[in-house]
Amino acid sequence: MIVGTEWLVEAGECNENLLRDEQVLRAVFARIVEDLGLKTLGAPLWHKFGGEGGVTGLLMLTESHLACHTYPEYRTATFNLYCCRSRPEWNWEKNLGEMLGAASVNITKIERGDPRSAIRNQKTAIVGGDV
Amino acid sequence: MIVGTEWLVEAGECNENLLRDEQVLRAVFARIVEDLGLKTLGAPLWHKFGGEGGVTGLLMLTESHLACHTYPEYRTATFNLYCCRSRPEWNWEKNLGEMLGAASVNITKIERGDPRSAIRNQKTAIVGGDV
């Protein structure tokens, strides 16, 4: 039984300063929630690691959850968006290009609950040109 | 750059009453944290959906995060464990068999941060015999 869809997103070659800025990641979460019409459950959890460290965010949704972890030292951010109801595709490539300076964005989409946890599709986009 | 490993776990044919019991899911989280020597960051978020609904849990770790969603109506629970440092394998099959009555457990392991988000391996176990 498919109980939800999860998007695993890897954003590479980001601006490392943006990845250290909790407010920037909060803005990414807010845009995802608004654009997809998601409903939050309670307050999010945010943690900024010390010094040059990155940011972790977790947000509970009635539709499941949203998570991010950033690694400024590798100019990389990863996101999980898990939705138990059908939602349109968010434009990760364009939005993470604009908001984090990501130059590459990879998206893996997985159906959850399936005993074979089928990977529905996977794509890598090089951000540029149209951003 | 590989920044972490994520286990996506689908537990099927569970005992539906256990999937509605937040204390049972809290106990699963506690055992994972203890067995793998993980460090929690702040309090977890828990939500029990009304009536016959399931449970959602999110826990921030210094190593990244742990999440679960249960679907008693489908006798299914899903887990995400994301670790940014190397951890031993947890025995999902045996433990979820014992704690949730799961009769099948599927594990998908993904390296995060890799632009190709390589799926390292995937296995499905039928719980039985040795449990």
Image (cartoon, coloured by chain):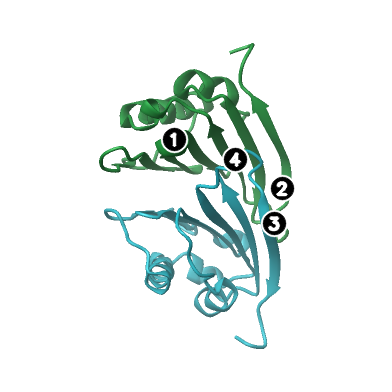
Chain colours: A green, B cyan
Q: Which residue, given by chain and number where applicable, does mark 4 sit on?
A: A7
Q: Which of marks 4 and 1 is nearer the N terminus?
A: 4
Q: What is the chain identity of the residue bearing mark 2?
A: A
Q: Which residue, given by chain and number where applicable, does mark 2 sit on?
A: A119
Q: Earlier in the sequence, mark 4 or mark 2?
A: 4
Q: Which of marks 3 and 1 is nearer the N terminus?
A: 1
Question: Can residue A91 be spotted in the picture?
Answer: no
Q: Position of residue B24 (x, y in %)?
A: 42, 71
Task: State the separation of the CA atoms marked 4 and 2.
Answer: 10 Å
> Regarding mark 3 in the picture, which secondary structure is present there?
loop
Sort mark 2 into few (<14), some (14-19) or many (20+) by Cα contacts within 10 Å.
Answer: some
Establish whether labels 2 and 1 are both on one chain.
Answer: yes
Type of amino acid under label 3: Asp
Question: Can residue B127 be spotted in the picture?
Answer: yes
The circle on residue A114 is 3
Q: Are marks 3 and 2 in contact (CB under 8 Å)?
A: no
A72 left or right of B19 in image: left
Which mark is in front, 3 or 2? 2
Q: What is the chain identity of the residue bearing mark 4?
A: A
- Where on the picture, by quarter, is residue B59? bottom left
Establish whether labels 3 and 1 are both on one chain.
Answer: yes
> Regarding mark 2 in the picture, which secondary structure is present there?
strand
Q: Residue at x 33, y 40 (%)?
A: A53
The one nearer the camera, A54 or A44, is A54
Q: Which of marks 3 and 4 is nearer the N terminus?
A: 4
Which mark is in front, 4 or 1? 4
Query: In the picture shown, does residue B123 fall above or below B6?
Result: below
Q: What is the chain identity of the residue bearing mark 3?
A: A
Quadrant, the N terminus of chain A: bottom right
Type of amino acid under label 2: Ile
